[in-house]
Image: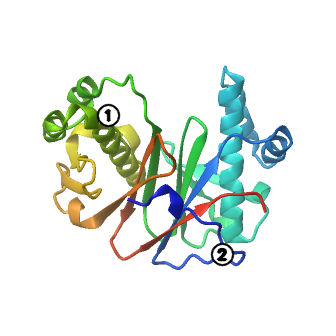
Amino acid sequence: MIPSASWNSPPKMLRLPSNSVHVWRASLEVSVSHLQALKDTLAADECARAERFYFQEHRERFIAGRGLLRNILSRYLDREPGQLRFSYNSYGKPALIEETGVEGLRFNLSHSHDMALYAVTRGREIGVDIERFRPDVEAEKLAERFFSPREAAVLRTLPERLRPEGFFNCWTRKEAYIKAEGEGMAIPLSSFDVSLTPGEPAALLRSQKDPREVSRWSMQALDPKPGYAAALAVKGHDWELKCWQWSPM
């Protein structure tokens, strides 16, 4: 696991070689003036999506999340955040449109409550997920409903005090994987196994669709902040990870 203390300030000259994966940690709690500046970079469709949120808190976090995504990607592309253009596949996964100078740049994002993670790499599929721990989660019931039989059985064997952590380990790793695949919930969560025992390395263990998937993907557990679980899924194994803390330049 990458501990929370390992999130460093990025260098001014930011490089992203093809064998690197960068994950950014950012708070979605921003000042009113910063929020407006972020909103000014959004496209019309993003502003329209923001307005569909009923609660102001959710609306503001969406604006902050999308604005920060634009700011982070602009650092790799040497373009203004407002110039970036996105397309979406049939499952809603975003990608940069070629005219923006994509150069093989791939990315994924996730947020929970006031925290967001952004994963960026080149030429390989990637997915990231973050979840805030909820003490009232019915871990075993949800596992029986959504996880594979093996995962549900492993969860039941854990000491009761470790089951919430095991549950969120499993959930974030599954979410990161289906987001990296780009098909979201069209991939049944019960159709593949991931590791979940606290202290055990994150890994894809089985794929019902294709057993070879296990050798094609790697996973990394992340520790963005106490009270949160997070995971990264990356195509291939020949990469190194750097974790950055976002702050306005």
Observer able to see residue 185: yes
Q: Nearer the viewer, residue 219 or 6?
A: 6
Give x and y (percent) for residue 75: 70, 67
* Looking at the image, residue 206 lies above or below residue 166: below
Q: Nearer the viewer, residue 163 or 18?
A: 163
Residue bearing mark 2: 14
Q: Give, as a three-letter code, the residue at label 2.
A: Leu
Q: CA distance from mark 1 to mark 2?
A: 37 Å
Mark closest to the chain's N terminus, 1 or 2: 2
User: Mark 1 or mark 2, which is nearer to you?
Assistant: 1
Q: Nearer the viewer, residue 183 or 221?
A: 221
Residue bearing mark 1: 164
Q: Residue at x 65, y 53 (%)?
A: 69
Instruction: State left or right for residue 248 relative to residue 230.
Output: right
Give x and y (percent) for residue 30: 75, 42
Determine contact: label 1, label 2, CB under 8 Å: no
Q: In terms of secondary structure, where does tag 1 sit? A: helix
